[in-house]
Every structure is written in structure tokens, then in C-alpha cells.
Image: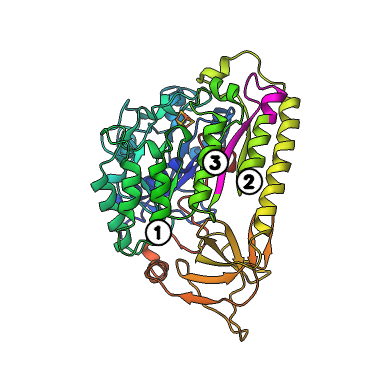
Amino acid sequence: MTAAPRTYEVRTYGCQMNVHDSERLTGLLEEAGYVAAADEAVADVVVFNTCAVRENADNRLYGNLGHLAPVKAARPGMQIAVGGCLAQKDRGEITKRAPWVDVVFGTHNIGSLPVLLERARVQQEAQVEILESLEVFPSTLPTRRESAYAAWVSVSVGCNNTCTFCIVPSLRGKEKDRRPGEVLAEIRALVDEGVSEVTLLGQNVNSYGVEFGDRFAFSKLLRACGEVEGLERVRFTSPHPAAFTDDVIAAMAETPNVMPQLHMPLQSGSDKVLRDMRRSYRQSRYLGIIERVRAAMPEAAITTDIIVGFPGETEADFAETMTVVREARFAQAFTFQYSKRPGTPAASLEQQVPRDVVQERYERLVALVEEIAWAENRALEGRVVELMVAEGEGRKDAATHRLSGRARDNRLVHFAPVDAAGGEVVARPGDVVEVEVTYGAPHHLVADGPVRSVRRTRSGDAWEARTAEPAKGVPLGLPTVGVPAPTPDAASCR
Ligand code: SF4
């Protein structure tokens, strides 16, 4: 009788970069013979892919590890691994504080995980392996994608900037760029597997090319994506305003499969605070980019990240942020209260803003952001939008029988899958439908009229094929077991 395969669970914290790294960890583990643990079941191997961005990240990690200690003690053979930014930062400290951890691995050596687990098992000893720089670009590792129709594609890792609130440069290292041919080959391979939407990923995605000396490399890459047959939607995240050049706006506007959507972190509208953050653009440059994006793509949805209460932020500085929010009319903004991040220059700055002041400003900012986002959504009522049908949790709302999809501008739309005669419309994840927006809600759109058209796609076929593959153990279209969504408190490094 053969032994049952060992099961795994990957717990992900942090930004999209970590979510993508977790897809690779999952791919590596499956290639090594592990299978995803069933929902609620305790896995044989629990992997924490950590994030060091938030102030209490360590407390949370050690709390979670503490909960697992008795579980592990009662279950011989269970292993615990810790990777990601916090592992890169704390290194050997983790096995000192939690000696029941079997493996600690850094951000540059996720490919070593299966070997380290095996070595820890054979040697009955914790393995700590942290590399200072990348040896293999992580996209060359096997990946178990969360989605049948959408994929992340890393174009670069690391960052050459030195924002004073950010720990990323010291943990992910200097920017390393993949060659365009390699990126495009990966995209073509994904399209051959049924993927029709890719998101190009980089800590500072639009500075792509800095390593091989081509300052137009990112816009060229966007245009090259336009030539990939079968690739319907291209997105990217996150660009830095300082490196945002007009050739990128032109490439976005002139390449039909590059979506009219831009997520561009603002962080603060005050020039003084931007200087203290060591963000090398100013308010006028930021608003200038938005103006040119809107002129080239009037239908674009622009979203952002904002930090409130950076050390030294005065009421007048905060008012500048509110001014930018009013002028930019963001479709959505991820708002964060500044919290000290150990190891960052800003953590030791004097003039930390009192908590109650930060809270009060934060509430005013959120109210303004929501008011504008809702008004922008209401303005879309009556418009016909093209959706790619979504998968995963919330795809089907049991109470309303609505399905969900993403519009070209990335807005979430819940729609009634019925035709003009009241019959059911069958639309699989990855298929494309056209619907008319009947209601603009604060955080999403609703389309309760009949579906105007349905296009069955190769992605829908791929989804059907994957859901019929029980051996993979990941029931796509249902909540994903192997790679849970990131926790909401660290949506972005910025
Ligand atoms: S906030 Fe973004 S751009 Fe700034 S240092 Fe961190 S990763 Fe780089």
C-alpha cells in the first residue's frame, strides 16, 4: 500500500508580490508531491509567507506560531516553514523564539523550500537559509495559479528607491529586471494554457528596464503585449509617479488590450511630506500625470494608496492631500494610518503625529474618498460594460443569484445572469459578457437588466477543464484551499 501524499497549506500575508510568491510555493510543493490540505483540515506542512510591512507583523506571526506549537506536538511528522519578508528580516531569530519551526527561508530562495523541508525531516534539525540576492528569477519556478484565466507575471523584483516608510528595499534588494523576451515567452505560455488576462508585477513596475539601460522598456513591453494573440486584458501594478513617462500613457491608450485602469500610489498630497518620505515627485507632477491619463483615456479608473499621519504631517499638509483627492477623483483609494515599521528611517523620526489626530484625519479622508468613489460609480449607471466573469469566493451570490465580473477598468460588477426572455444565461469564469449598469453602489456596480451578449472563451474552457481535474486538489471556482487571499491590512508595500 502506498502512503497518502503529504498535505500542505500556505498562509499568505502582504502584498501582491507575496500572493504571487505563494502561487510559486504552491507550485513547488505540488511538483514535489504534496497535495493541498482539505478545508479545515490540519496540513502536514504549514507554510507562512510573511510580510514585514505592518508594525505588529512579528507579534502576529509569533502568535500564530504559538497556536500551532501544541498542534504540532500532537501530530508527529508535521512541519512548519516560515518564508517571506519577515523571515528575511528576522532570520535565525525565528527558530530561537519558536524552536518548533522546521524551516526558515528568505525572499531570494523560495525555490529551496521542498529541499529544506526534506533536509529538516531527515536531519531532525531546523534549516535556516537566507540568501542576500537572487540566484534564480522566481518566475522560472513552477507555479500553481489561483485562477484559470488570470495570472501574475513578474517583470522585476526589488526596488532602487528609498522611501523612508518602506522596508522593501532592505528585504527584497535592488531592482532586478527580467529580459523582455523571457517575460513575453511566459505570457505566451500562459495564453496557451487558457489565460486571457495578465497583470505585470513589479515593486516599481514602470522603472522596468533600469537594469539593462532602456528607459522606454516598460512602454515597449506594453506594446509587445498588444501583439500576443489571445491575450485579452493586460494590467500592471504598481507604477511610481516619479518614473511615470508619457510614452507609457501613449502605449496604454494605443494598445487595445491594455486596460483603462491605473493604480498609482499618491501617499501624500503635501510636497513637504513627500520630501520627508523621500518620494521624488511633487503634487503638481502627480496631478499632471492624472490629467494626461484622463485626456488620453477618459474612461480610465484611477486608484491610489494614501498614508495619513506621516511624522511631521501638519493640518495644512493633510489639507493638501484632501485637495489632490478632490482633484484626482479616484475610483478607489487604499488608505492607511501611518504606523512605525521597525527598520525603516521614518520609525526614528521625531514629531510622530498623535494617534487621535491621525484617526480624526483618517476618518475625514475616508469619508471624502467614499463620497467621490460613490459619485463616480453612480455616473456609470446606464452604461454598457464588458465584464470578464470572475471566479473564487463570492462569484455567485446565493441570495440574489447574481454572478460577478470585472469591467475593463477593473470595477467589480454584480450582474443577473438572465437573458431578455428571463432565461438563465450560462457564463463560466473567464467568459465575457456585456451588461448595462443599473446601479452604482459605493464599492461596486450592479447590472440587473438582461445580459446583452455572452462570449464563450478559451479561458472558460480552461476553467471547465481545471474544475474537472480532481487530482489537482484545488477546486477552482470555489474558495481556494492552497493559497488564501492576503490579509486585508497589508494590501500594498506602499
Ligand atoms: S514604497 Fe515602493 S517605491 Fe518606495 S521603497 Fe518601497 S517598494 Fe520602493
x, y percent for residue 224: 30, 52
**Point 52% across, 33% down: residue:** 285
What secondary structure is found at the residue carrying circle 1?
A: loop
- The reply to whether callout 1 and callout 2 are in contact (CB within 8 Å) is no
For badge 3, the amino acid type reads Ala
Q: Amino acid at mark 1?
A: Asn
Rounded to the nearest whole Å, what is the CA distance between mark 3 and mark 1? 26 Å
Magenta highlight range: 302-319
Of mark 1 and mark 2, the one earlier in the sequence is 1
Report whether 321 appears left or right of 187. Answer: right
Q: Report which residue position mark 2 lands on.
A: 329
**Local SS, label 3:** loop
Q: Earlier in the sequence, mark 3 or mark 2?
A: 2
In the rendered view, tell whether residue 366 sits above or below residue 268: below
Locate residue 443: give its quadrant.
bottom right
Q: What residue did someone put label 3 on? A: 491
Mark 3 or mark 1: which comes first in sequence?
1
